[in-house]
Image (tube, rainbow, N blue to C red):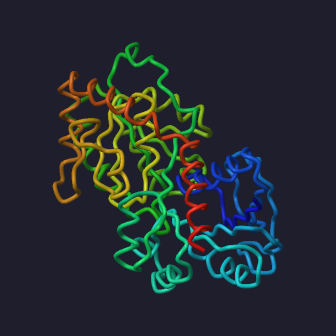
Amino acid sequence: MKFTFPILTLCIGGAQRMLAELANGLTARGHDVTILMPSQGAINYELSAKLVRTAHDYQIIETDYPYSDVIVSNYYTTVPSANEASRNGKGLHIRMSLCYEPLFLPENHLSFPTYHTTQNIIVLSKWQQQLIFLLHGISGHIVPVGISKSFQNLHFRGSQSKLQVSAIVRRPEGGFSWHREQDYMIAHLQSLIDRYPDVEFNLFCPPDELATSPILQQLKTSARFRFYTPGDDREMCYHYNQTDIFVSSSTYDSASLPGLEAMKCGAALVTTYSGGNQDYCLHEENCLLSYRYENRLGYDVERLLNDSSLLRRLASKGEKQVQKWTWERSLSAFEEALSAIMQKR
């Protein structure tokens, strides 16, 4: 089949990662896949799918679309042009909702109506499926995220002299990362730094975001944390493997790739409930999970710092239980969703 994916950017991020993996995976399965991208769109992932740049710096318009069987829109600003192209006979429009934008991004008066454009919707988790059904009456098809084969347990934790607690931070300027609750997480980790001087506390950040964020630069110069700026999966895998306890404070995610990746690499996960992570997080079984109102993030990290048997048990269970989260599974679920949509049509 011929697919067109209008994509504004493929910068580092879970949503962009999924788009790249699906486009490449469909290409590997013999489909004809075109990624349609503005001239200034960033690309931080390797692509095997065909890339076509538009003549516009930051947008995609209807006349940019080639004829195909299926158009897969994603971010809400790609929906209008994809829908117009579909109405003009350029392919069946399917909306892949990688995040539910109206709840955490500005201009929700613009993003909310885009969910009335098509009933053909793909979502990432049961929680997101329920959310969109409650608000719009549409039951989306679930296509779960996957974990790259690059991420695996390298089994060198026993050689480290200190326990390592790690988390990811992103550029807070611009208002696109408030749902990550980074200030909450940093405050809890800083309170532990004072009481656990023999523990290393690390923060991972995309290099370009650290370079352009005064807030993150100030945090780095405080010398309270060790900062790492992994540039690819190999480096990220190494840092996950350095980590004994991985901490996630996001309270709103359709899915959460970092938690899955850390677990696959053998780290114990301490996290807040974020909606989408309910599909793989089981409190006291493969992680420690708390709701934001409980204000328990630091307490849960401390539990693992003081209970090595619990830490090892959760890390082992987590690593085993996330093995099924592969991109091959995601691709199969995507093709099954496409088949169901076509049959219904």
Residue 7: x and y in percent read 67, 65
Vertical relation: 7 (above or below) 242:
below
Instruction: Reply above or below: 51 against 192.
Output: below
Residue 212 locus on image (x, y percent): 57, 57
Image quarter for residue 103?
bottom left
Q: Position of residue 215 (x, y in %)?
A: 45, 57
- Quadrant of the rendering where the N terminus is positioned: bottom right
Question: Which of the 4 image quadrants contains residue 166?
Answer: top left
Q: Residue at x 40, y 35 (%)?
A: 263
Residue at 46% over, 81% down: 112
Q: Nearer the viewer, residue 326 or 250?
A: 326
Does 232 sit above or below residue 135?
above
Q: Residue at x 35, y 16 (%)?
A: 161
Q: Is residue 252 left or right of residue 241?
A: left
In this view, 297 is above or below 261: below
46 vs 217, left or right, is right
Task: Give me the residue at 81% from left, 80% from top.
Answer: 63
Quadrant in the rendering for residue 308: top left
Taking depth in this image into account, of 108 and 178 the one nearest to the observer is: 108
